[in-house]
Image (cartoon, coloured by chain):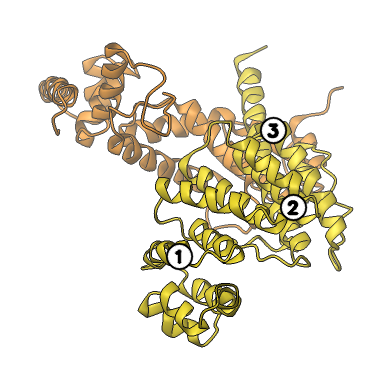
Amino acid sequence: MTSHQAMVEKLLRAGQAAGQDKLAQQAYQMARTCLSIADSGTAGKMRWLEDPRDVTSLRDEMGRMNARTGSTLQLDPLPLANPTASSAVEVGHACLDFGEGLEGSTSRLQAARALLMKAEGSVEEGADRLLAMLNGPLTKTWYQFTQENRQYALLQLGHYELVAEIGRGLLKFEPMASLGSFNLLTALSWMGQDAEFERSVDAFRASLVGVSDPGHWSGLVADEAEWFAEQLGRDPDDIMKRMLPPGLLDAGSGGAA
Amino acid sequence: MPESFLERVRKAVGAPVLPDVSEIDRDNDLHVDWAASALVQHFKETDDIEAYRLLVDLTVERLTELAERVLQEEGLAESADELVVNYFESLFVDLGSSRSEGSTYLGQTAEKLRVDAEIRVRDIAMSGVSDPEGAVMWDDGRVATPVKEADLRTRATRICFHRLDLSYRRVLRAKEIQGLSTAEIADQMSLPLDETKALLHEAELRLAEIVEEEMKGGVS
């Protein structure tokens, strides 16, 4: 092989490898999009740190990268005009399988798989998957993300004591874990443990000072305050005041989400 | 009779590229510009991998020359191959429009290579010696692979090189990477021989000085 041919081959391989990386990234994005579609009909509220991408443009881009790389990743089961939860789950799992083939069982893929299982109704399996993730190496961000989502799955399963236990541990690890703190307060409300709720609510309120998405938090608390108050035998306005810092309290009273 | 390269290009893009010639002259920038522009446009519009293959085949040597020139002008101690690989990786995953940016293919690509080189100089110069690339770091800060003194010095030299003034980087690169003699460097940089010798000496001294400072944990 001449040096020209060798360099051409090297560049073709480099292009292919970059294309595969891009496709793995897109597959992960598509799995998130599918997850949001599958989750939209469930009772729970999934909180997205970054909104999933629009399915139409993402599928167009993936189709193009499929063509460039010669990949056979199948996206057809997801109808663009009317994507259903079951078609989204099918394509979501296919995207995660594809991503795992390229980048291995990374934290983001494992987490997306667990949440997809939860969205399709296999909440316990999803929670088990999240628990299994804790046995492997995780960055601090992924540890917090995993524990908060595990709490959420366990809340749906009614394992309130376990949710509270995870919350207490998480707050020692990261006192500003707002979601972990909120999940702890939710579990304590379910269990009617007003004394611990009162001890824990200050940490939650402190974690909301300076958050980048105050509207989300004030809306979430406004939505749940009445239910918390009912479980704990307290006044909803009192709950709002205890949970929200002054700046967010004004926004929350309007019920903005 | 085997198909000519130009015939393959015309077949790939489905258009009569360079209708007045029988074969592409790869040393002719006009030929390369026309054919490469058609191939890039076709690749971006249709995702046809054959157009990408032909583009790589057609332009690899010319782009490597351009990259080498850019690297020398920017005084960057990287290989031209790396810059070219990065360019083609970016092109492969670029899903943007194929709209012409009002310049020739080679002109646009030289500009992209220059921007990439500038970013690399900045990134290397700003990186920290004590945070070696490739070392496995755990969340609690433990480093799985101990870094050897010699590796640290090599890394410090690479970083400190990119913190030097441009004129120092250029003469050192010409000597150490291009392998030019002092007379050839003087010719390349249009400088008198004595001045070139002095510049080389100053550059070597300054590099040694800031590497030592960096190894002691000082600020250069």
Which chain does orange denote in the image?
Answer: B
Q: Is residue A82 left or right of residue A243?
A: right
Callout 3 amino acid: Leu
Q: How many marks?
A: 3
Which sits earlier in the primary sequence, circle 2 or circle 3? 3
Residue A131 x, y percent position in the rendering: 63, 40
Q: Residue beneath label 2, please?
A: A118
Q: Are marks 2 and 3 on the same chain?
A: yes
Q: In this view, does A126 lie to the left or right of B213?
A: right
Residue B183 x, y percent position in the rendering: 22, 17
Which sits earlier in the primary sequence, circle 2 or circle 1? 2
Q: Residue beneath label 3, please?
A: A102
Callout 2 amino acid: Lys
Q: Residue A195, which numbered label? A: 1
Residue beneath the point at 38% across and 32% down:
B140
**Mark 2 residue crowding within 10 angstroms, few (<14) / some (14–19) / many (20+):** many
Residue beneath the point at 14% across and 34% down:
B219
Q: Is residue B191 left or right of residue B150?
A: left
* Separation of residues labelled 2 and 1 (CA atoms): 32 Å
Residue A31 x, y percent position in the rendering: 72, 51
Residue A41 x, y percent position in the rendering: 78, 67
Q: Is mark 1 on a helix, strand or loop?
A: helix
Residue beneath the point at 38% across and 74% down:
A245
Callout 1 amino acid: Ala
Q: What element carries label 3?
A: helix
Q: Which chain carries label 2?
A: A
Which chain does yellow denote in the image?
Answer: A
